[in-house]
Image: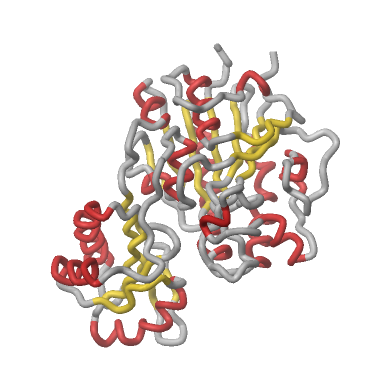
Amino acid sequence: MNSGIKRAIIIVFDSLGIGELPDAAEYNDAGSDTLDHLVRQCGGIDIPNLRSFGIGNIEGVDSIERRPAPIASYGRMAEASKGKDTATGHWEMAGIILDKPFPTYPGGFPPEILKRFERETGYGVLGGSPASGTEIIKEFGEEHLKTKKLIVYTSADSVFQIAAHEDVIALEELYRVCGVAREFLYEYNIGRVIARPFRGRPGGFMRTEHRKDWAIEPPGTTVLERIKEKGLPVVGVGKIGDIFVHKGLTEEVHTKSDSDGIDKTLEALRRVREGLIFTNLVDFDTLYGHRNDPAGYAAALERADKRIPEIKDLLKEDDILFITGDHGCDPTTPSTDHSREYVPLLVYGKRIKGGVDLGTRKTFADLGQTLSEIFGVERIPGALSFLEDILTA
């Protein structure tokens, strides 16, 4: 169909889950419900703009008041892929559905991997187990300063994280080491290698904004690549470039925080008049979800909500805005890792109907298929566009 839509904006509130998926128990996530739990624990939340979009009207969201006439269409999406990590969620939105999850290491990395890391990089290893990034830096940071051994750790995700003090290991050297690790870890199908530089002294270590990811390439062609092949701009804001291994993008805009991410999204809206702007706001996940900080998470949602009018003011007649998540990370459960949850789907624009209940989508790829229909690119097998349901005549 000829939608008349020329520009799409996707904003991912990283880890904003809205209730356990039917298979959550298989991932040790039974009972997880990121949004409802943090709202209840904090005694409420002030997000009038998301409420006006209809976030409280979505099935399964019980902690936020329903609106009788939401200005956006709303629903929730289930993850069809196996897994619950960032790459899997974003890839599925872009049309890649994985039939098996990336490997994880709940008992820590096997000696085979750690010894190979030491052999190929020339650095000793501290750690090697699943851990909170801030806690493992606190535990091994002083020894790292003395020995220059690198702090290696993982999480419930398929990640190989390497932490080093910026005064001990220069950023360029840390990035080189990560590149070496990425090359041999392809053999193990580990999803991402992540550089985790930090600063400070014992008792006051702090991670810096110089994180960098090396991900496995998506095993297929994404809708981003197809839009780019049509000669249209595809702008990735935040860690989108890392997630998609720098494929399918015409521009990558790096950010220092969620506030900066919204600033950069606004800048892109002012200068890019067609194609796709794809933004990831990661602080919800890294600063609050993984640190079991519901109050911080709620405050971050409130800050982001206050910026929504700025985004709305820059939307043109032929724009469509999607707000969603990529997995959960319930800050009220004992776990500090991602949770297998539904994610919200809010769709707004001057030509988009308000109040349409999009129900429960069987896959995040329905969003990708909607993009495919908007831009007239190859369809995504097994996905259903919802454009016809929400587009005004």
Q: Would you say 134 lies left or right of 370 here?
A: left
The scheme the figure's colours follow is secondary structure
The quarter holding residue 154 reads bottom left
Q: How many marks?
A: 0
Seen at 57% across and 59% down, the residue is: 29
Residue 359 vertical placement versus 188 (above, below): above
Location of the N terminus by quadrant is top right
**Horizontal and vertical percent for residue 216?**
31, 47
**Horizontal and vertical percent for residue 163?**
34, 71
**Horizontal and vertical percent for residue 122?**
15, 72
Residue ranking furthest to the right:
68
Residue 229 vertical placement versus 86 (above, below): above
Residue 377 vertical placement versus 206 (above, below): above
Location of the C terminus by quadrant is top right
**Horizontal and vertical percent for residue 14?**
54, 52
Toward the viewer: 34 or 233? 34
Seen at 51% across and 20% down, the residue is: 373
The quarter holding residue 231 reads top left
Toward the viewer: 96 or 302? 96
Q: Would you say 108 lies left or right of 355 here?
A: left
Residue 326 vertical placement versus 44 (above, below): above
Q: Would you say 125 lies left or right of 249 here?
A: left
Seen at 85% across and 36% down, the residue is: 68
